[in-house]
Amino acid sequence: MKCAAFDYHRPADTAEMLARLAEHGPEARVLAGGQSLVPAMNFRLLRPAVLLDANALPGLDRVQADGDRLRIGALVRHAAFHLPVADGPLGRLLARTVPYIAHYPIRQRGTFGGSLAHADPAAEWCLIAVLLDAEVEMHSQRGVRSVPADGFFRASFTTDAAPDELLTEVRLPLLGNDWHVGFYEFARRAGDYALAMAGAALQIGRDGRITAARLALGSVAGRPLRLTTLEAGLRGELPGPDLLREVAAGAGALVEVSDDIHASAAYRRDLCGVVLERALRQALQSLPQDAAA
Amino acid sequence: MTEKRRIVLTVNGTEHAIAVEPRCTLADALREECRLTGTHLGCEHGVCGACTVLVDGAAVRACLMFAVQAEGRTVRTVEGLAEGDRMHPLQRAFQEHHGLQCGFCTPGFLMLAAGVLEETPDIDDAGLREALSSNLCRCTGYQNIVKAVRAAASEMRR
């Protein structure tokens, strides 16, 4: 399995990259880590005429806090998140999520921005982006724009990015210390695509009650799903095992799944509740013991 | 598009001036152009790990990188592990602990383990098993590979 022939360019700066994108448009693909793009090319599912290698672009490999946001350059490799990239709950959530992404050598090459641009429904970073209402920044010769994750992901492998646009940065909110976070996914084999995954972030007030909740499921639809009705059900409540189980049990009814070769629809629905409950439990582990009712 | 590009690959400390099409993967360039056939190709889509090599010290799939991308980088393959006749601790440990049978996956496992241990010399058991889950072996059942890498890790720490 060898990929079809293509023309290769490695622009030295963003201006050159944007010019190439404008010139080649849909014929071209941007190469970041290549851990999904190259297999698809080797299978000849994709046959781009032009490959534009982003790896020499300066400044896209940095993670930096900026006010209440964390700015993640599009070329930051997955492996960079194993040690928390920021103090507090956000760095913790990213570090808890990254081990689930494929395998060690894939994490050495794959990039945060590439994962979002690829928009695989089973991608962990896409789930995190939707969970935390990430802002996705894109550049083209027409200008710069940022879109919220909810508007960025359109459908399976489909984003709002136009063919001449380059994803440059993703911004996530630096969650305060009153946020408690968790991630869990289930796959048949270590490193495999998940059958279901869940992210949870709970903000707990001084009185021990939940003041805000963010819940999301991945791998069960064309794009990550925010579970806003379940989030509303948590607000104002005292967190505890019974509440979490009850809320998580409602997750399966919110997804449209069907039987396939990997699992039945009933099994997948059940799994949605399981992964969500486990993500919620992990979130509550960082609560002081006496606070968890 | 199929025009060949002249590049210089630095593999195991030796420079190889080669000409490749852009679509030539690093793995194919190592085997066909540099004539270093120790790097094996199994699945060619990043799943089996037989083609794992070190690029700038990081264990990566050589089937998911194009040779033109490795220009100016330092590549290490299984041929670079031994020092003359003296095998690398990982190679000795694989032999002693029966960490291979047919040997097809072995170069990939050796380079994966080399990358992991150079990054984290004191890696714990769970971390080691997680890292070794990256590659496929159809002979050993993995237990002896884990044993071998664990033994090599303690020898390399000495």
Image: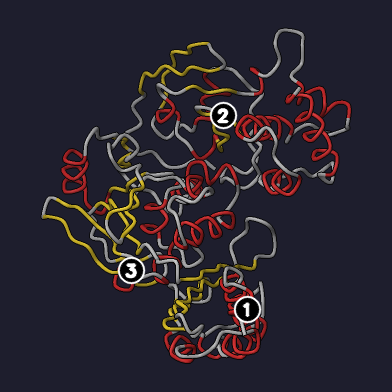
Return the chain for callout 3. Answer: A
Tell me where residue B157 appears, x and y as whole percent. 73, 26
Q: Which residue is mark 2?
A: B54
Q: Which of the two discs, 1 and 2, sits closer to the camera?
A: 1
The answer to which of marks 3 and 1 sits earlier in the sequence is 3
Q: Are marks 1 and 2 in contact (CB under 8 Å)?
A: no
Instruction: Tell me if residue A220 comes above or below residue A31 in the rendering.
Output: below
| Of the pair B43 and A216, the residue shown nearer to us | A216
Q: Which mark is residue A149?
A: 3
Q: From the viewer's perspective, is A267 left or right of A94?
A: right
Tell me where residue A152 appears, x and y as whole percent. 30, 68
Instruction: Tell me if residue A205 comes above or below residue B121 in the rendering.
Output: below
Q: Which residue is mark 1?
A: A290
Return the chain for callout 1. Answer: A
Q: Which of the two discs, 3 and 1, sits closer to the camera?
A: 1
Label 2, label 3: how far apart the Cα atoms are: 35 Å
Position of the N terminus of chain B by quadrant: top left
Q: Find numbered disc 3 in the image and state the secondary structure of the residue it sits on.
A: helix
Q: Are marks 3 and 1 in contact (CB under 8 Å)?
A: no
Q: Quadrant of residue A293?
A: bottom right
Q: At 85% across and 41% down in the image, what residue appears?
A: B140
| Of the pair B65 and B112, the residue shown nearer to us | B112
- Three-letter code for the amino acid on which mark 1 is drawn: Asp
Q: At 11% across and 55% down in the image, what residue appears?
A: A142
Label 3, label 1: how far apart the Cα atoms are: 36 Å
Looking at the rendered structure, whether the residues under marks 2 and 3 are on a common chain is answered as no
Q: Residue furthest left?
A: A142
Q: Find numbered disc 1 in the image and state the secondary structure of the residue it sits on.
A: helix
Looking at the rendered structure, whether the residues under marks 3 and 1 are on a common chain is answered as yes
Q: At 40% across and 45% down in the image, what residue appears?
A: A76
